[in-house]
Image (cartoon, coloured by chain):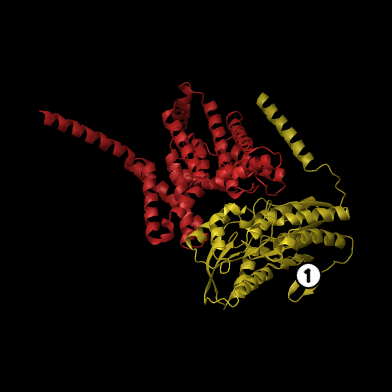
Chain colours: A yellow, B red
């Protein structure tokens, strides 16, 4: 009995504390816009969170950042179902998979919630707009940059290794497809693809193992910037390979993080294609708020074969020549 | 006469040697060692890069951290328990140690100690929930899996912890006598816990507890205290493993160790431990972790698609357990 009372007391104190910390006591009448990235703790999305928070402050609306702990579509579906029950006003989501999220987003729209997508779209869901850079196009840009790096190169065959995240993840597959379509028919040939499951440690192990055993590889294309979240010292083999022949060994990567600067300083990255996640977060909240106010969507454009409006948040191509401006 | 006695001594010696060899050969650790040796020989033949010292050291360095966590969960599994909070404690402790340096300006040693203490504390809570609240280990540690992971996100807000002290990097990136530090750390921990399990009274009691908890209790052993201690030590070892990984990467990540509990438990099972308790060795777990490390390395070296990685590991787990069962049936 004593044990039971003790346990119940602990539960009540914990539950009260958690609800207080989570802000459950806040007024429910304030407009709430929720941004749902693919996964909690994925550093790529953190600038989007900052953009969302800034937009919330500027517009005087309540914003929230809710995501599953793993980048899985089913977990994201559950998050959206919860938000529908909660009756939020707007949802901006980066979809783990376009088809898997489609039905639940339709349900959200039917429930009167304004839905938009950013970074990774679900075009058939009927969302109001998509804000971001197309992942396929980002892959195309990476392919074009890689081709430029090997323009007029004397070798007839350039071997490329690819690092990807979770096999089958829609955004990464789109980038890969864009990259592969762009280099098709060129002298660039993909000889290896390793998947790190979005795990930074695994990404380092794969890149290190493959580079150590294949020092004659010419180039790496990172479909996501996982290995550049760490300190350069964590990748001695990769660094040795890159610096042993910087003219012929090239690295093109998606994503630009603050930690990427150290790699640029050491000449370890040739091209990094960054996406403007801050703008994605900011513009998603701003335009959902506009729709709720009955105002038009700013910066949205119609694209052929693209349902709804497309807000191009742009991107940046960071190279050893311009990286200092980027990290100022 | 002299020749006759020499012959008797020699035969006695041979008998002892034979029994000693027999006792080694009959151990699960030895059998799993043979599996690992065969894998190494095959890789040695088909993949020249595998043979290089730099590759072998890198493989050992990579599996060292997981093997240390595996040793922690070996203790738990020997008692007949299970711990699903390995990966979350691994990540949380790495974050705590790095935040200690970056946010609270602690020197390296106190920061590492803080991470270890947090791991031990979470392990202690696991133990208390299991013993005092009589929660099944699966449930108690499943709860801790979520709590520790959530705490990592709360205190970091999802951001990686960067800017660790240079001295901290020695744990994961440094080397002694050209051998990476994590390998030395694994060696020291493996020796300590092998002696602890096999040569101390407490160690023998842990086996007894897993073999027959009721009988152990009746014989006057405080099994509750033993269980709490095992979960606490386990938490400390998962924490150490997470801290080494944070040092290896030079950052603390709230997502670190996500799903690693299954890798650690797989290493223990491949190494011959029984999930029903009472059976398991530190050597077996280290070899189990090594097999998983070699497999991962082999798949990369042979340019086999990563999609196959989990498939192959699954096959190895099943074969290891079937072999063990067949052997036990023969007996």
> Horizontally, is B325 left or right of A313 in the view?
left
Q: Quadrant of residue B168?
A: top right
Placement of the N terminus of chain B among the 4 image quadrants: top left
Can residue A181 be spotted in the picture? no
- Please tell me how many numbered marks the rendered image carries: 1
Chain where mark 1 sits: A
Frontmost residue, A309 versus A176: A176
Q: Nearer the viewer, residue A245 or B24?
A: A245
- Is A149 placed left or right of B43 in the picture? right
- Location of residue A247 in the rendering, given as x and y in whole percent from the top left corner: 58, 69
Q: Residues within 10 Å of mark 1 (few under 14, many from 20)?
A: some
Specify the farthest residue to the top.
B220
At which x and y percent is residue B53?
Answer: 43, 53
Asked if one can make out residue A237 in the rendered structure from this viewpoint, the answer is yes
Q: Percent from the top left, x then y, of residue B81?
A: 52, 36
Quadrant of the drawing holding the C terminus of chain B: top left
> Depth check: A211 or B12 in front?
A211
Q: Residue furthest left?
A: B1
* Rendered position, B237 above or below B259: above
Q: Which residue does the image show at 56% across and 46% down from the upper left? A: B172
Q: Which residue is the site of mark 1?
A: A308
What element does badge 1 sit on? strand
Give the residue displayed 89% in from the left and 60% down from the top: A293
Instruction: Residue A260 in the image: state x and y as whole percent.
Output: 67, 58
**Which of B71 and A271 lies nearest the eye of the viewer?**
A271
Give the left or right position of residue A251, taking residue A133 as reference: left
């Amino acid at each position: 009995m004593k044990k039971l009372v003790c346990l119940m007391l602990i539960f009540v104190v914990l539950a009260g504390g958690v609800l207080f910390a989570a802000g459950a006591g806040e007024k429910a009448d304030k407009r709430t816009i929720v941004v749902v990235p693919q996964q909690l703790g994925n550093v790529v999305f953190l600038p989007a969170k900052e953009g969302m928070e800034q937009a919330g402050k500027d517009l005087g609306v309540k914003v929230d950042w809710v995501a599953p702990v793993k980048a899985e579509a089913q977990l994201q579906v559950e998050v959206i179902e919860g938000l529908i029950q909660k009756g939020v006003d707007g949802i901006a989501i980066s979809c783990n998979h376009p088809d898997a999220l489609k039905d639940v987003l339709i349900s959200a729209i039917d429930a009167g919630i304004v839905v938009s997508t950013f970074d990774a779209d679900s075009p058939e869901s009927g969302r109001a707009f998509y804000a971001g850079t197309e992942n396929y196009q980002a892959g195309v840009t990476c392919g074009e940059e890689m081709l430029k790096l090997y323009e007029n190169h004397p070798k007839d065959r350039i071997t490329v290794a690819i690092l990807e995240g979770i096999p089958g993840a829609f955004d990464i597959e789109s980038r890969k497809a864009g990259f592969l379509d762009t280099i098709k028919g060129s002298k660039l040939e993909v000889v290896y693809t390793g998947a790190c499951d979005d795990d930074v440690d695994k990404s380092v192990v794969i890149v290190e193992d493959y580079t150590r055993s294949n020092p004659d590889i010419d180039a790496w294309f990172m479909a996501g910037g996982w290995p550049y979240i760490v300190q350069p010292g964590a990748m001695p083999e990769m660094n040795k390979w890159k610096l042993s022949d910087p003219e012929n060994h090239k690295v093109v990567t998606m994503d630009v993080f603050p930690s990427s600067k150290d790699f640029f300083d050491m000449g370890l990255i040739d091209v990094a294609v960054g996406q403007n996640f801050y703008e994605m977060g900011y513009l998603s909240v701003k335009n959902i708020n506009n729709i709720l106010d009955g105002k038009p969507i700013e910066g949205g454009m119609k694209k052929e074969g693209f349902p709804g409006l497309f807000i191009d948040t742009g991107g940046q191509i960071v190279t050893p020549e311009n990286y200092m401006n980027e990290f100022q | 006469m002299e020749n006759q006695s020499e012959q008797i001594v020699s035969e006695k010696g041979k008998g002892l040697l034979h029994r000693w060899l027999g006792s080694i050969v009959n151990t699960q650790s030895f059998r799993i060692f043979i599996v690992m040796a065969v894998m190494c020989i095959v890789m040695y033949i088909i993949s020249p890069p595998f043979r290089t010292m730099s590759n072998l050291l890198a493989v050992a360095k990579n599996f060292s951290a997981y093997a240390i966590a595996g040793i922690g969960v070996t203790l738990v599994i020997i008692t007949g328990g299970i711990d699903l909070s390995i990966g979350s404690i691994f990540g949380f402790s790495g974050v705590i140690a790095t935040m200690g340096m970056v946010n609270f300006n602690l020197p390296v040693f106190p920061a590492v100690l803080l991470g270890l203490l947090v791991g031990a504390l979470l392990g202690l809570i696991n133990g208390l929930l299991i013993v005092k609240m009589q929660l099944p280990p699966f449930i108690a540690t499943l709860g801790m899996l979520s709590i520790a992971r959530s705490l990592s996100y709360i205190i970091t807000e999802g951001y990686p912890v960067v800017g660790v002290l240079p001295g901290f990097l020695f744990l994961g990136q440094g080397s002694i006598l050209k051998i990476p530090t994590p390998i030395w750390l694994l060696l020291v921990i493996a020796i300590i816990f092998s002696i602890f399990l096999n040569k101390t009274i407490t160690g023998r009691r842990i086996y007894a507890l897993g073999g027959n908890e009721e009988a152990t209790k009746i014989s006057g052993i405080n099994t509750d205290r033993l269980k709490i201690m095992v979960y606490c030590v386990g938490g400390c070892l998962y924490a150490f493993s997470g801290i080494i990984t944070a040092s290896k990467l030079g950052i603390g990540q709230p997502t670190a160790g996500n799903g690693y509990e299954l890798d650690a438990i797989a290493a223990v099972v491949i190494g011959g431990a029984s999930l029903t308790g009472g059976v398991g060795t530190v050597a077996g777990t280290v070899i189990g972790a090594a097999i998983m490390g070699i497999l991962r390395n082999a798949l990369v070296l042979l340019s086999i698609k990563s999609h196959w990685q989990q498939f192959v590991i699954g096959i190895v787990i099943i074969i290891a357990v079937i072999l063990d069962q067949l052997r036990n049936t023969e007996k």
